[in-house]
Image (spheres, grey):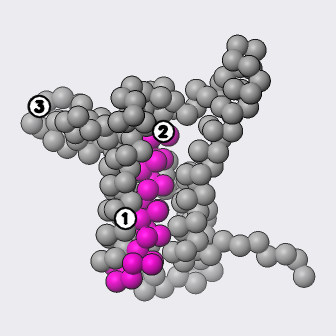
Amino acid sequence: MPYPVAHFLFFIFCVSAVAVYAIVKSIFRRELSSGDLPQLLLLLFVGSLCTLFPDIMIVYNLPVNGTFEHCWIGPIATHSFLFSSTALLLGTLAGYLAYGKSGKAIYLGLFGEAAFLTHLLLDDIGEGGTEYLYPIYNGKTSIFSLMDVGFQETGFIHYVIASFVSVFFVCFVLMMALFALDKLGFEFKYRPEK
Ligand SMILES: [Zn+2]
């Protein structure tokens, strides 16, 4: 499994790279003030917590059982789409406590959800799959292995579907993070030349 620091750095500097770029640019232009710090720290806190959340059970299993088991809470797979709903809830709750508005809170929930799904993608690359589909299927499946399907073995239609599913799932996670950041103050848009 990738270590926590890799999950944290990957989400902040790869998935949220455009936000890091915007922040650094604003710092150099002296457009950021100390009043912006709470909002940025809230994003950092929710993003960090949610991207590490699938491995939460190691906090219990390492000191209590002396094992590195971290993928299950009893019968529940933590590296699954089902368990990712906890990140949506955690982020939305944190947003509601911070902003007092459910409309804006849901965007922080989506940011947390994207952070959680990023963890699954990184574990997928590192371990060859995770329990995405629990409880429909309890074994490991891999989004990235779909990219390696050859059309000579599986047929052209299967090859095209596998390519679309794998690429657009990764795209979906990135778009979710961008959409949330856009709504939380970054405001990405294309400005045509005049
Ligand atoms: Zn993990």
- To which residue does mark 3 refer? 65
Query: Residue 108 or 141: which is nearer the viewer?
Result: 141
Q: In the rendered image of this protein, does residue 90 appear above or below residue 191?
A: above
Beta carbon of the mark 3 residue lies under 8 A of ligand 1: no
Tell me how far mark 3 sits from mark 2, CA to CA. 26 Å
x, y percent for residue 37:
42, 78
- To which residue does mark 2 refer? 122
Residue 159 magenta-drawn? Answer: no
Query: Residue 107 or 33: which is nearer the viewer?
Result: 107
The stretch in magenta equals 98-123
- To which residue does mark 1 refer? 91
Tag 2 or tag 1, which sits nearer the N-term?
1
Tell me how far mark 3 sits from mark 1, CA to CA. 30 Å
The residue positioned 24% from the left and 31% from the top of the image is 69
Q: Quadrant of residue 6?
A: top left
Describe the element under mark 1 as helix, strand or loop: helix
Category of crowding for the residue at label 2, using alpha-carbon neighbours closer than 10 angstroms: few (below 14), some (14–19), many (at least 20): many
Q: In the rendered image of this protein, does residue 115 appear above or below residue 94?
A: above
Quarter of the image containing the C terminus? bottom right
The residue positioned 38% from the left and 50% from the top of the image is 84
